Amino acid sequence: NAVVGAGAVVPPGMEIPEGALALGVPARVKGPAEPPGNAPRYRALAERYRKGLLAMDLPRRYRLTLRGQDALNPFSELHLHLKRTRKEALEALRRASQGFPLALEEALPLVEEGFLAPE
C-alpha cells in the first residue's frame, strides 16, 4: 500500500515501495506515507449517510405537446390567456420544457388539457 499524490505522474516501470508517499511530475518518493487520521471520521459519515437513505419514486418527466409548445410562445393567444389566468401552469410548462421533473398533482391537469405527455 503506497500513496500517490493528486496530479502526480508515475512513469512506466517505476515501482513505489510499500508504505511510501510519491509526489510530483514525474513522481518521486518523498518518504513514508502517514496513516490517515481522518479515516474513522469518514467511516462514521458514510454510516450516517447509509442510515439516512430513503426509498423514493423516480421523478416523472413529461414532454411538451404541440399545444404545450404553443402555450410557451409569448405571441400566442393561449400564452396570453394562461399568463392572465394560470401563471403557475406556465411556470410548470417552462420547467417541463427544460427537463425538470414535475409532481404528479402538478402535471396531471396539464396532461388532461393536452399540454404535456408522459415520457
Image (spheres, helix red, strand yellow):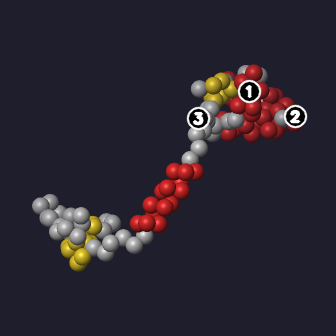
The mark closer to the camera, 2 or 1, is 1
Task: Pick whichever of labels 2 and 1 is earlier in the sequence.
Answer: 2
**Residue at horizontal 53%, vertical 54%?**
49
Question: Left or right of 18: which side holds 53?
Answer: right
Give the mark nearest the N terminus, 2 or 3: 3
Q: Nearer the viewer, residue 43 or 84?
A: 43
The quadrant holding residue 30 is bottom left
| Residue type marked 2 | Thr
Question: Would you call the spot at circle 1 few (<14 residues within 10 Å), some (14-19), or many (20 or more)?
Answer: some
Q: Which residue is mark 2?
A: 85
Q: CA distance from mark 2 to mark 3?
A: 31 Å
Q: Is residue 40 left or right of residue 100?
A: left
Disc 3: which residue: 58
Q: Is residue 4 visible?
A: yes
Q: From the top left corner, tell me how far across and down residue 28 is, in percent.
A: 20, 73
**Residue with the mark numbered 1:** 108
